[in-house]
Image (cartoon, rainbow, N blue to C red):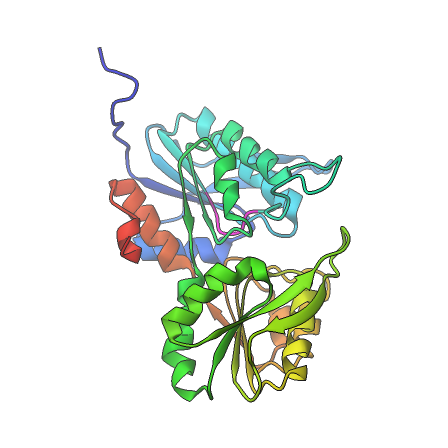
Amino acid sequence: MAQSNELRVYGGIKLYAGTASPELAQKVADYLGEKLCGRDIVEFPNENLFVKLHSSVRGQDVYVIQHTAAPVHRNLMELLILLQTLRLDSAARITAVAPYLCYGRSDKKDQPRVPITSRLVADMIQIAGADRYMTLDPHAYQIQGFFSVPGDVLNASHILCDYVLENLRPYLKDPVVVTVDLGYAKKGRDFAARIDTPIAFIEKRRVANDDKPEALTIIGDVKDRDVVLVDDEIDTGRSIVQAVNLIKENGAQRIYATFVHPVFSAYAAQRLAALPVTEYITTDSVPISLEKQEVFGTRLTILTVAPLLGEVIRRAHEGRSVGEMFNE
């Protein structure tokens, strides 16, 4: 009798996209030489969602590509319903590919009577039917421990780093990498080591449950230097406004801002466009509307994460190492 822990054999790759990430999903499909599978996603007048697959996925290796940035709850529910639909249609293995995973900041009880919502999101993804998950640069890497299914937590900051190294590094004057806060210090050190620059840190303190942290001081030297400012995501943009102003007050020259996730809530794009930043460099983990892109003029560079996601999907399907991609 076959044992339940024996290696299962999956069918072909099947790619599905929610409505949140159609362009990124198509780029991933193009990289893999696959087609996006057909599905209907309907919203009824009462705001309930309905999903129907165009063809069977019985026995197949299925990947659902859907970020969960704004509109957060619509996108999250789409992902969950897609996962359950695939499970009920007897897919052999289902992987939730969420380039940006919502509620990543709610990762601990740091005060009385509050939830750990990122754990709740992990539970829902698993219960909906995901056998595996894939995501990019979570705000807190400990959320991996909230999942009891295996997953690939990928680092897209190397895409930004490669761009800086190839396109900016030769022209930077006495450059220094600066992290927006101390929480990004380790990633910042890796970034600085790769482009061979010193590093400085901004110390900031968040004193309430709002989006208004107070930037306090710079640990390190930025005077008369070009600065590469690094962070994982930009949400409202208030942190980076304070960071840029503080860096300028300390005598920095040109500033280049790099970040993986362009969440851009509220008036973030307008706040950023008003800053004395030479170039913003980000990815398409979260799509940026044309209206928001236009406020930056030529100062916004968007790098795609599709080859990264596509290659990891290929390796996961073939049972090959993902760490080899990063010399690990």
162 or 36: nearer the viewer: 162
Residue 151 magenta-highlighted:
no
Q: Main secondary structure of the magenta part?
A: loop
Q: Is residue 158 above or below residue 277?
A: above
Q: Quadrant of residue 61?
A: top left
Q: Is residue 294 above or below residue 157?
A: below
Q: Quadrant of residue 257?
A: bottom right
**Picture coordinates of residue 80 (x, y %)?**
55, 35
**Picture coordinates of residue 278 (x, y %)?**
56, 83
288 or 326: nearer the viewer: 326
Residue 100 magenta-highlighted:
yes
227 or 285: nearer the viewer: 227
Q: Find the residue positioned furthest to the top.
A: 1
Query: Which residues fall within the magenta stretch?
Result: 97-101
Horizontal side, residue 189 vs residue 114: left or right:
left
Q: Is residue 34 visible?
A: no
Q: Find the residue positioned furthest to the left.
A: 1
Who's the residue at 32% across and 41% down the image? 13
Who's the residue at 67% across and 63% down the image? 204
157 or 207: nearer the viewer: 207
**Picture coordinates of residue 295 (x, y %)?**
65, 76
Q: Is residue 288 visible?
A: yes
Who's the residue at 62% across and 45% down the image? 103
